Amino acid sequence: MDGLILAAGFGSRLRDKFACKPLALVNGVSLFEISLRQLASAGVNRAVVVTGYQAAAVEAAVADLRAKLDIEILTIRVDDWEKPNGYSVMAGASVLPGEYLLVMCDHLLSTPILKGLSQASSETRDVTLAIDRQTVSPLIDPDDATWVEMRSDGFIAFIGKEIPRYNAVDCGAFLAGPGLAKAIEEAICQGKPGSLSDGMQWLADRGRAATFDIGHAWWMDVDDPKAHAQAESELDGSFALLDQGCEVATA
């Protein structure tokens, strides 16, 4: 299976602590390396990394990790990294002909989430999003979260940071096919900025965006100094928490 990691953004909220978010260390291991290791643990054997801000530093880290990890790693650089993250998705997906696991470099995701998500393929959808029904948690920043309103069948009705109603939170992990990049492109043509959520909403409006319930599996978004401190506290040196089991269900 293929994987896609978005690592092109500026990371402004973590900027005072780390100059480059993908290379931010959690107990001595970079967020970027954790993402690659977790994808590999879920069965990914080739990962495409989209770089942008401080691309040279991230690409140098890729070169080092190729010798350490049993996974093929490719890089694609986007020059306009200040554009919404959907542009990174389109860039990375351009070399991925089939389905792929898509993750953000600053999201820590336990292995069962990614393994379960990798098995959520279906002709009924173009993308499946890992969601957490627990919307109130010390590990979730309500001011930065992307919220999801699911229909009764588990498919997505609405997704975004400012939707009025929601019953789940976006975990930042997707099983996607070619339809996701096409949806982002269509959303841009309709005047949207071009975020990943714009493409997701385009698919949701057409009944093609499903969800994957992570149950009680562990995850968090390391987006600011507070979250970084929480991550170091939650994860010990062995990162054993990332391998915890869970019960999951897919729409």
Image (tube, helix red, strand yellow):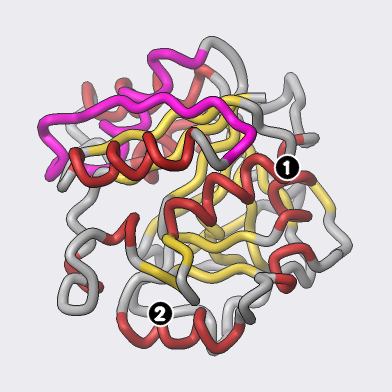
Residue 100 in the figure: left or right of residue 64: right
**In the rendered image, which quarter is residue 224 located in?**
bottom left
Q: Position of residue 201 (x, y in %)?
A: 43, 41
Task: Tell me, yes or no, whether the highlighted magenta stretch contains residue 246.
Answer: no
The residue under label 1 is which amino acid type?
Ala
Residue 3, compared with residue 220, is above or below; it is above
Q: Which mark is residue 111?
A: none
Q: Give whichever of 146, 232 is nearer the camera.
A: 232
Task: Tell me, yes or no, whether the highlighted magenta stretch contains residue 78.
Answer: yes
Q: Give whichever of 136, 224 is nearer the camera.
A: 224
Which residue carries the number 1 mark? 42
Residue 88, compared with residue 164, is above or below; it is above
Residue drawn 56% across the image and 59% down it: 171
Residue 188 in the figure: left or right of residue 23: left
Q: Does residue 207 appear anywhere in the picture?
A: no
The residue under label 2 is which amino acid type?
His
Q: Residues within 10 Å of mark 2 (few under 14, many from 20)?
A: many
**In the rendered image, which quarter is residue 117 located in?**
top right
Q: Residues within 10 Å of mark 1 (few under 14, many from 20)?
A: many
Q: Please give the range of residues in magenta.
A: 69-96
Q: Position of residue 83 (x, y in %)?
A: 15, 40
Q: Give whichever of 54, 161 is nearer the camera.
A: 54
Earlier sequence position, callout 1 versus callout 2: 1
Q: Position of residue 48 (x, y in %)?
A: 44, 28
**In the rendered image, which quarter is residue 186 located in?**
top left
Residue drawn 57% across the image and 84% down it: 136
**SS type, badge 1:** loop
Q: Give whichever of 175, 190 is nearer the camera.
A: 175
Which residue carries the number 2 mark? 228
Q: Quadrant of the N terminus?
A: top right
Residue 142 in the figure: left or right of residue 116: left
Q: Quadrant of the C terminus?
A: top right
